Image (cartoon, rainbow, N blue to C red):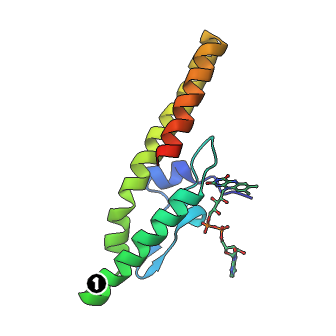
Amino acid sequence: MNPYLWDDLINGSFVPAKDNVLLVGDSAGMLFPTTHEGIGPALKSGIMAAESVIQVLRGQGKAEGPYLRKIGEIKTVLVELQLMTKKLGDAAKKGADAFLGSMVELFERTINE
Ligand SMILES: Cc1cc2nc3c(=O)[nH]c(=O)nc-3n(C[C@H](O)[C@H](O)[C@H](O)COP(=O)(O)OP(=O)(O)OC[C@H]3O[C@@H](n4cnc5c(N)ncnc54)[C@H](O)[C@@H]3O)c2cc1C
């Protein structure tokens, strides 16, 4: 079962890190909307978590700080994909070609990530 946490992650009501405990991938709500591609963001956030741990091992503080900053990049993509998903309904009202075009755009954006 895939978690649907996009909105909570984007609006900040769900924060996927506390001190040195960092959630990545699906558990952090990073599964992409509509396409449900989650391998890319899972790998990317895993690397970001590892980088954050290394960063604090070399310095001071908790890993949550650098990690939450780094995943801002993934949250930006999620916002973009959410907007594209919301536009699918409008495209569908314009007809099959418009809907197909919007779906292709959404899949291409996901694949590029
Ligand atoms: C049917 C299906 C098809 C999919 N197809 C695609 C696709 O084509 N492309 C794509 O990008 N994404 C796809 N996804 C989504 C993708 O699989 C996930 O987004 C991705 O695997 C998330 O990786 P993760 O490491 O966050 O979580 P997971 O891969 O779920 O790894 C979490 C691991 O933690 C383990 N675990 C859970 N609880 C505990 C516990 N208490 N103690 C110890 N271990 C625990 C689980 O057994 C699991 O091995 C698909 C998902 C499904 C369900």
Alpha-carbon neighbours of circle 1 within 10 Å: few (<14), some, or many (≥20)? Answer: few
Nearer to the camera, 80 or 19:
80
Image quarter for ligand 1: bottom right
Residue 95 image point, x, y percent: 64, 11
Q: Quadrant of residue 94?
A: top right
Q: Quadrant of residue 69?
A: bottom left
Q: Residue at x 63, y 17 (%)?
A: 92
Nearer to the camera, 50 or 22:
50
* Whether residue 96 is situated above or below residue 37 in the rendered picture: above
* Whether residue 82 is situated above or below residue 47 in the rendered picture: above
Q: Residue at x 43, y 46 (%)?
A: 77
Count of marks overlaid on the render: 1
Q: Identify the residue position indicated by label 1 in the image.
A: 61
Tell which residue pokes out farthest to the right in this image: 1
Q: Residue at x 56, y 22 (%)?
A: 101
User: Which amino acid is tagged 1?
Assistant: Gly
Q: State whether residue 16 appears in this view.
A: no
User: For this view, does 65 lie left or right of residue 78?
Assistant: left
Q: State whether residue 64 appears in this view.
A: yes
Q: Residue at x 29, y 81 (%)?
A: 55
Residue 39 image point, x, y percent: 59, 59
Instruction: Provide the secondary structure element on which disc 1 rests.
Output: loop
- Ligand 1 within 8 A of label 1's CB? no
